[in-house]
Amino acid sequence: MTHDIAVIPGDGIGTEVTPAAVEVLEALEIDFEFHEADAGDAVKAETGEALPEETDDLAASADATLFGAAGDTAADVILPLREAVDSFVNVRPATAYPGIDAVRPETDLVFLRENTEGVYAGHEDRLSEDVSTLTRVVTESASRRLAEFACDYVEDGAHDGFTIVHKANVMRETDGRFRDTVAEVADERGVATDEVLMDAFATRVCLDPEQFDVVVCPNLAGDVLSDLAAGLVGGLGLLPSANVGPERGLFEPVHGTAPDIAGEGIANPAATILSAAMLVEFLGYDEAGAAVREAVEATLEEGPRTPDLGGDASTDEVTAAIVDRL
Ligand code: GGG
């Protein structure tokens, strides 16, 4: 069976790490057909559109999408692409790997981030010269859908339960609804939960990450707290993500375009290759996904490594080492 994979490198280091992940996917004995498309700052500068219609259509029809990174046009690119695959949850594992100099080497977390609403719903207005506003959207239906996924995730992975992270003491209506709905679904499903205010979570996870495992959170909190967790495990070059929908998925590193190193050929491809492993598993190839992950882990431990991890290898050298190990 052939799987159609949309490949959207985006901007900056997205154009360097996405081909690296494709190289790894090509090394697997799976029948992929890759379809590359443009999105982001560069195509906007050229055509006036950050997300050409054919790119959006491609993501909406492909079996899965591999995405790189978006810069200034992130809101015009990533949010509609997530919508194109009907993604309601962004799965972001933050794991420390042997051999990597991590602030907290005991970190092993998974963020399940609400992926359709919150402050990323796109309702921003400039009311006057002085005043801009943002409307935060939280629905029972989206919170319920996320909670059902979280319960399945906990059950499938034999986790003990999950932590609901929110700020319901201040955003009483929106995060109150989020917390109550997620807790109610977990209760109906017999899944254990605890809850932590998101500011307290930020401190507690730095001091003792082992007290957390699966973390369920609203959209912006998931975006910010997973970047914080990247700091605990050795950097943004290590965090993959899966935007999961009922039929399709979009897989991307948590990092952005990294303009400071873009074009130098030294971007860490691990996050995107680990995202590709999630893509492979999403399509049902668990063994192949595990093999990619193991090859990445061995390369992180034994080298070569890119400069963000203290090495001096290029993106291509690290990718070749991963492919060799596969
Ligand atoms: N590959 C992820 C990426 O491009 N991140 C940049 C960004 O601004 N992301 C916002 C988000 O993940 O919602």
Image: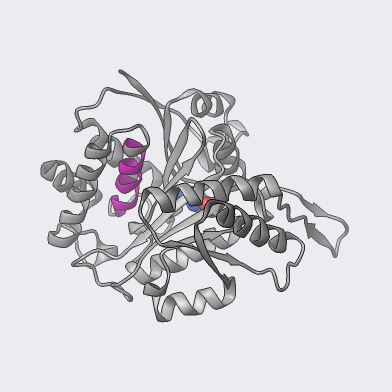
Q: Can I make out residue 257 in this image?
A: no
Which residue is most to the top? 1
Q: Can I make out residue 232 in this image?
A: yes
Residue 45 lies, in percent from the top left, at 57, 38
Image position of 68 with respect to 175: above or below: above
Q: Tell me the magenta residue range.
A: 267-280
Which residue is most to the bottom? 207
- Write the residue at 57% across / 48% down: 146
Residue 242 lies, in percent from the top left, at 43, 45
Number of numbered markers:
0
- Can residue 40 be found in the magenta stretch? no
Residue 309 lies, in percent from the top left, at 26, 65
Image position of 273 with respect to 176: above or below: above
Q: Is residue 217 left or right of residue 295?
A: right
Is residue 143 or residue 10 the one in the foreground? Answer: 143
Image position of 111 with respect to 21: above or below: below
Residue 231 lies, in percent from the top left, at 39, 69
Image position of 130 with respect to 38: above or below: below
Is residue 26 or residue 10 the one in the foreground? Answer: 26
- Write the residue at 36% across / 51% down: 157
| Main SS of residues in magenta | helix
- Image quarter hosting the C terminus: top left
- Image quarter hosting the N terminus: top left
The colour scheme applied to this rendered structure is: one colour
- Can residue 270 be found in the magenta stretch? yes
- Write the residue at 28% across / 72% down: 105
